[in-house]
Each structure stands twice: as structure tokens, then as C-alpha cells.
Image (cartoon, helix red, strand yellow):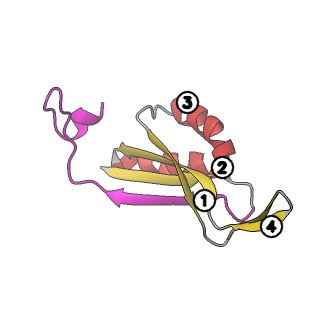
């Protein structure tokens, strides 16, 4: 099993959610996050004063899936979220040792379904 974490632009989330549904990925954890990278920050203007915004709003989408689903998910994320501009985001893939469904005590793959 793997955990796939995607940091994406907020405006790309609805399209990504739809595409993930199409390939059978329903279990997601979604968080509003802020961060910076090569995109850096931007300068804002408020009441006649300028100020630096060092962190950009992003959406973090997390899912735990079978190993064989990872490649398809990565392809969908790249196709859906890539604009070709700095700030499109990142995909992180991490190993998962086990999953336990609290209600039924099912473990492993059975707990993902």
C-alpha cells in the first residue's frame, strides 16, 4: 500500500476530484494548506500600503491506495493539475505498513475497500 499526497492549486481540485472518481478513487482526505517554493510569494496592496505574502494557498489531497493504483493516480493528477507554470504543486508517494478500519477491525487491503 502507498499514501499519495498531492499539493495542488485550489482551482484544480474540483476537476481532480471528478477525474479520481472516474478511475475509482473515492477515499480522500483534503486540507487547505499554505506553502512556498520556487513560486515564492507575491506583493499585496491594502489601504495604500504594500505587503509581502510569503505563503500561497494550496490544497493537499491525500489517499491510501494499493500499489498498482499509484501510477494511474499520478497520471491523472499530472494531466488534470498541470498548467506548465511554477506553482502547479508536488506529488509525494510514501509506503504504508498497515491500515486498520476502526469500526470492524479489518486490516490491510480489506480496510481500504
Give the x, y percent position of residue 30: 48, 41
Circle nearer the N terminus (4, 3): 3
Disc 1 to disc 4, C-alpha distance: 27 Å
Region of the chain picked out in magenta, as a range = 85-113
Q: CA distance from mark 3 to mark 2?
A: 16 Å
Q: Position of residue 50 (x, y in %)?
A: 80, 67
Question: Residue at 34% of width from left, 44% of height from top?
Answer: 66
Residue, far right = 48
Q: Is 103 in the magenta?
A: yes
Give the Cα separation between the discs numbered 1 and 2.
8 Å
Residue 43, picture quadrant: bottom right
Q: Comparing marks 2 and 4, which lies closer to the viewer? A: 4
Q: Main secondary structure of the magenta part?
A: loop
Give the mark toward the camera: 1 or 4. 4
- Residue at numbered disc 3: 22
Q: Earlier in the sequence, mark 1 or mark 4?
A: 4
> Label 1's element?
strand
Relative horizontal placement of residue 45, taking residue 26 as reference (left or right): right
Residue at image point 41% right, 58% down? 93
Q: Nearer the viewer, mark 1 or mark 2?
A: 1
Residue at 64 percent across and 46 percent down: it is 10
**Residue found at the very far top of the displayed protein:** 104
- Cα–Cα span, label 2 and label 4: 31 Å
Residue 107: x and y in percent read 16, 38
For the residue labelled by badge 2, is the local secondary structure a helix, a strand or a loop? Answer: helix
Amino acid at each position: 500500500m502507498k499514501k499519495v499526497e498531492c499539493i495542488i492549486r485550489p482551482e484544480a481540485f474540483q476537476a481532480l476530484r471528478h477525474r479520481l472518481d472516474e478511475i475509482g478513487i473515492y477515499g480522500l482526505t483534503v486540507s487547505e494548506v499554505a506553502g512556498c517554493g520556487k513560486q515564492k510569494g507575491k506583493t499585496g496592496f491594502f489601504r495604500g500600503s504594500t505587503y509581502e505574502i510569503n505563503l500561497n494557498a494550496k490544497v493537499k489531497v491525500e489517499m491510501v491506495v494499493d500499489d498498482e493504483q499509484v501510477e494511474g493516480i499520478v497520471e491523472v493528477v499530472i494531466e488534470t493539475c498541470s498548467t506548465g507554470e511554477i506553482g502547479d504543486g508536488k506529488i509525494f508517494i510514501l509506503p504504508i505498513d498497515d491500515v486498520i478500519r476502526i469500526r470492524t477491525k479489518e486490516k490491510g487491503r480489506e480496510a481500504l475497500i
